[in-house]
Image (cartoon, helix red, strand yellow):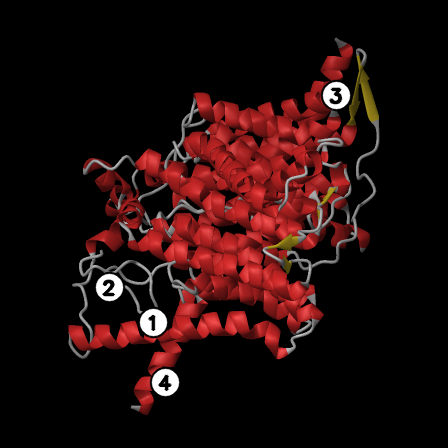
Amino acid sequence: MEIFVQQLVNSLSMAAIFVLIGIGITLIFGLTGIINFAHGEFLMLGGVFTWLLVSNGVNFFLALIAAIVLVGLVGLLLERAVFRFTLERPMNGFIISLGLSVFIRLWNSYQKSIPSPVEGVWQIGGVRIIAMRAVVVALTAAAVALTFFTISRSRYGLALRASVADLETARLMGIPVRRYVTGVFLYGSALAGLGGALMIALFPITPFVGQDVVVGGFAVALIGGLGNVAGAVVAGTVLGFADGLAAGYGQPEWTEAYSFALMILILLVRPQGLLGGTEGPASV
Amino acid sequence: MSSNGDPGYGTHPLPGPPPQAGEGNSLRSRQNLPPPSRGRAGVGAADARGSRETVVAAAVLVLVLVGVPWLNPGYRFLSVAISTGTVAITLYGLALLFGQAGIMSVGHAALMGVGAYTAAILSMRLGMGLWSALPFSMFMAALAAALIGLPALRVSGHHFVIITYAFCTLLAIVLTNGGSFTGGATGLDVEPVGTVLGINMDRLRNYYLLVIAALLASMLATYLISASGYGRTLRSIRENEPLARAVGINTGLHKVGAFMMSGAFAGAAGIFQAYYLRHISPTLYGGLPSLYIAMSVMLGGARTLYGPLGGAIIVNFLPEILNIDPVDSRIAYGAGLVAVILLLPRGMVDGLIGLYRWAARQRA
């Protein structure tokens, strides 16, 4: 039992990364219909920025904030320079994101790592909790809470939900839809930046990490229902647990295969995803 | 959109909706259909000139492709040309799927892998050669396509894109963990092709001609399919799926069918690649090769007959022959893809043809 709880606790931090990247993917898809393949590269950029700053003597938490801001800016820049021209045809946006994902991978392929910024291990019952992992989960929980609060309580969230539900009507009601598209790209990539910064604090990353993580992010977005933020949180947690348990109990070399099998199973039973999603907007 | 019987392929721009690369599912594009354009110099004259140009272009292409070995190209040139040719066969499959039915897949390298591994395993366990294994490779790739397509195409094109990519990653894991059956991470060796009809296929030149024959066959198949009634059915799904369903087209069946057909192309490409490389391993068929295949189709243009071949040449052939650094060429593809989508949505080949026509008009 203790081992089981230990596995669950360990898999929480991977679940946090899945959730962070899944929210960005699902938000961008919900509003624009673009499947952003470059989202994993945003996460990689977050990790690399953090690594650059920390290895130049900057405090990890300052570097984390800088990574969020920088990656957010990258997202903003790409939306303004490229993606906004593809809003008429989301499939073109997807293809462009393919191009960007091979384009952004500029760094050399060496593994990059930073010393763990928070040391220490807590012992609760028989379960060992590594402090850094707790920090990761806490920061992710804060980001998720902020996202939920904004989307469900603020007028901006209301306008966003209205735009996702019916873009044309939302525009006719005076909601500046294009500005929300920009905002979603900014926010989604900032979350990916946070994810990257947290990921490099947990384990070393390579410039190819984006490619692996983005598949997990897609799985999260699909399982939860494309465009559904709550779904992404639930699915990210489920997938994180599945990953952790598969690594602990199954054969570790099949770990990734389990999550895809889970994704295909869920799609067979519930094609709209666990909590239901959108088909993407008909046009922007 | 085929109001004047255009097969949806050919060197001249199609009449109908404005140029586009992606699915035509945006409401706006359906509402602002321009009136079908007739040729500049009257219908008959333009068609006669157009068809003569088409025939001449096809003849020149066949001559150049078949004639290459007699120009003393050297070993490296021919090897790169063979691998470009095998990839181009896959690209024609993907062009049918995306250009005609409007369904994008980023899993075609995996389908190639299914074909290649089928051939390698059949050769290893049952001693089957290239020709007897070819139908099995195509069949297994089509079967894999059906297995992915049935759950994924039920929902939407977006799900399909993601599932096909996941399939690549999944297949790589399965092949890596397959033990001695798939050879694990090191992969499998493939027997040499041997002699076919008294021609020694292990000579590079003869194998090149074999691949070119397969490539021309797949181009012809692509042309015939897209000019047929079936091609029209697929285009109706691309342009407006609800409408296609409303007029009685079984869109679910045809989408899976188109993906299976596309998979059969990839399977054939996989077996030709396996017998050329003589050794296959999981990394050949993972996510990144699939992305490159999708990019090549978009770069060349999915809806023009010569687009996929052009894409294969741009992505696989030119960087090798011109000795461009892989990192530089990767950056160039990324930037080029973005530029093509934004500026030349019908692909580079169509852009080149447009340039040629413009120059011809200036001279006249």
Closer to us: A24 or A139: A24
Q: Position of residue B99 (x, y in %)?
A: 38, 53
**Label at residue B54:** 1
- Can residue A104 be seen in this snapshot? yes
Contact, mark 1 vs mark 4 (Cβ under 8 Å):
no
Q: Are marks 4 and 3 on the same chain?
A: no
Closer to us: B154 or B360: B360
Per the model, the C-alpha gap separating discs 1 and 3 is: 62 Å
Mark 3 belongs to chain: A
Tell me the SS state at disc 4: helix
Q: Quadrant of the N terminus of chain A?
A: top right
Residue B279 to residue A237: above or below: below
- Name the residue rendered at 48%, 28% in the picture: A224
Contact, mark 2 vs mark 4 (Cβ under 8 Å):
no
| Front label number (1 vs 3) | 1
Per the model, the C-alpha gap separating discs 2 and 1 is: 17 Å
Mark 1 belongs to chain: B
Residue B160 to residue B322: above or below: above
The residue wearing badge 3 is: A248
Q: Earlier in the sequence, mark 1 or mark 4?
A: 1
Q: Are marks 1 and 3 on the same chain?
A: no
- Name the residue rendered at 71%, 58% in the picture: A107
Residue A128 to residue B88: above or below: above
Query: How many C-alpha atoms fall within 10 Å of the one at disc 4: few (<14), some, or many (≥20)?
Result: few
